[in-house]
Image (tube, rainbow, N blue to C red):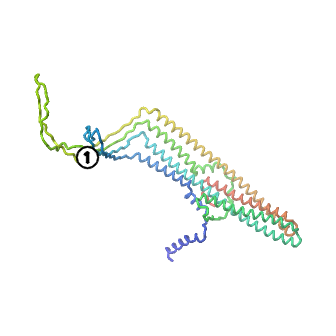
């Protein structure tokens, strides 16, 4: 087979194998990646980060010129001003005006630079928030993943106890038939078996619930046939929580935890906000240029008139040397054509270029209040940063204390398990010889089962506490 054929065959095998077997095996890494891509909270945080990046890009475009094309087209009635001749007319006029204007800010008291800096720090903070949301979700997925492993191990233990109780019931029945044990011992063992079967049902339900919790974090449907990978769960022998101290873990967390970085970025953004507010104290200077022209349906071509006749005007009486004299004159009448559209645009074409200076003199104290508000924003951002750092320190202290406590609990559970295992083995052996009754056997078995369950819980609890410490040190979540 060629390499292409082998690849195609492998791909088809993967595609069609999943429906055939009806389930997928997911590792912790795959669960974390899928959750971070599908979770709605993470998607929203990433969308907010993209919006912040667009805001930064918009702030940068303030340095570029703005160009605007305007055009008005319409008809006016009544006594209005002809836009081409600036004369009052009473006839309806169709008009069209066009203008192309451009403006370029030259200086604005540092307002543009400050807005760009503030937007940049805000974008970095939003990106850190998105990473923090993804990291927190990863820790939740790891906890749900370990909860499934714990629940399935408890289910296996419960099934083993059911099988063991059934064997004990058979052994007790043989002892009763041999006359070694009283018939009442059967009821004790049967009661023990019923209790073990009930606990097995509860353990099986707990597995389903833990899978449902993981599916919800992964944004999967409840009927999705999900199965997780079962790596070998071993307690790290080279890790001792007693060797952890606050300062090294805290120092590492300051460099790796995105929420700490986000708080620091917001302080920088608030500092840029002060400069942005102070920019309103200073003058602004901008360059402008424009092109314009207009058209009117009543605009006449006075340079190309046509004589249509001459008439004598009405007499006008004036007084000359105390004598009234009637004066008349000949008036030539001309007909003027309307100037074509393009020629009007050419004749009315105008240009403008210049500088615009705006000097703030008195603004009702608005700028001063904005500056004070921006300075208070720095104080709030610094307090938020200190609170974030303090909360991180408290969380790390708690995580170290929990890890130490979990290790001690695990050691104690291991010793209890070994003691209860030996005690149960002794009673079981004595019971098989008829030297111990069923009540002693069930009591020893119950104590052993509880010790085994406590040991399983302590093992996974300790492992999760170690993963929390790894999380604060920036280590990848792995089993």
Q: Position of residue 29 (x, y in %)?
A: 59, 61
- In percent of the image, x 25 and y 45: which residue is there? 297
List x then y, in percent, for residue 12: 53, 72
Point out residue 337 in the picture as x, y percentages from the top left corner.
19, 45
Quadrant location of the C terminus?
A: bottom right
Residue 150 appears in view: no
Q: Is residue 309 visible?
A: yes
Q: Is residue 142 left or right of residue 408?
A: left
Q: Is residue 152 above or below residue 302?
A: below
Horizontal side of residue 70 vs 478, given as left or right: left
Residue 471: image quadrant is bottom right
| Residue holding disc 1 | 345
Element assignment for label 1: helix
Q: Nearer the viewer, residue 216 or 389?
A: 216
Relative image position of residue 408 (x, y in whole percent) = 73, 54
- Residue that extends furthest to the front in the rendered view of this protein: 314
Residue at the extreme bottom: 1
């Amino acid at each position: 087979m060629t390499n292409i054929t082998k690849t195609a065959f492998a791909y088809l095998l993967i595609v069609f194998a999943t429906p055939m077997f009806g389930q997928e095996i997911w590792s912790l890494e795959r669960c974390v990646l899928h959750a971070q891509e599908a979770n709605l909270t993470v998607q929203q945080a990433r969308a907010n980060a993209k919006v912040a990046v667009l805001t930064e890009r918009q702030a940068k475009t303030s340095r570029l010129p703005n160009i605007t094309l305007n055009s008005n087209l319409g008809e006016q009635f009544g006594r209005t001003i002809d836009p081409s001749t600036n004369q009052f007319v009473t006839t309806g006029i169709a008009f069209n005006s066009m203008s192309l204007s451009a403006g370029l800010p030259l200086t604005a008291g540092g307002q543009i630079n400050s807005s760009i800096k503030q937007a940049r720090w805000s974008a970095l903070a939003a990106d850190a928030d998105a990473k923090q949301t993804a990291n927190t979700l990863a820790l939740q997925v790891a906890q749900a993943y370990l909860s499934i492993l714990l629940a399935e191990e408890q289910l296996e233990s419960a099934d083993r106890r059911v099988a063991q109780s059934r064997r004990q019931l058979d052994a007790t029945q043989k002892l009763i038939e041999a006359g070694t044990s009283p018939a009442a011992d059967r009821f004790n063992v049967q009661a023990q078996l019923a209790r073990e079967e009930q606990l097995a049902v509860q353990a099986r339900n707990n597995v389903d619930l833990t899978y449902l919790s993981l599916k919800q974090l992964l944004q999967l449907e409840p009927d999705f046939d999900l199965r997780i990978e079962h790596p070998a769960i071993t307690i790290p022998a080279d890790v001792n929580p007693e060797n952890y101290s606050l300062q090294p873990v805290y120092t590492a967390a300051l460099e790796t935890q995105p929420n700490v970085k986000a708080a620091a970025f917001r302080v920088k953004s608030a500092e840029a906000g002060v400069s942005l507010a102070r920019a309103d104290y200073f003058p602004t200077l901008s360059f402008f240029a424009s092109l314009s022209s207009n058209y009117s349906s009543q605009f006449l071509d006075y340079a190309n008139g046509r004589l249509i006749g001459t008439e004598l005007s009405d007499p006008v009486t004036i007084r000359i040397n105390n004598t009234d004299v009637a004066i008349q004159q000949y008036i030539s009448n001309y007909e003027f054509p309307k100037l074509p559209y393009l020629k009007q645009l050419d004749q009315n074409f105008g240009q403008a270029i210049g500088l615009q200076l705006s000097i703030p003199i008195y603004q009702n104290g608005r700028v001063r209040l904005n500056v004070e508000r921006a300075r208070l924003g720095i104080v709030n951002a610094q307090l938020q940063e200190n609170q974030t750092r303090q909360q991180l320190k408290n969380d790390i202290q708690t995580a170290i204390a929990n890890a130490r406590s979990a290790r001690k609990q695990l050691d104690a559970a291991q010793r209890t398990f070994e003691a209860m295992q030996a005690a149960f083995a002794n009673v079981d052996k004595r019971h098989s010889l008829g030297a111990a009754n069923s009540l002693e056997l069930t009591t020893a078995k119950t104590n052993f089962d509880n010790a085994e369950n406590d040991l399983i819980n302590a093992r996974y609890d300790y492992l999760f506490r170690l993963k929390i410490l790894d999380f604060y040190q920036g280590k990848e979540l792995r089993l």
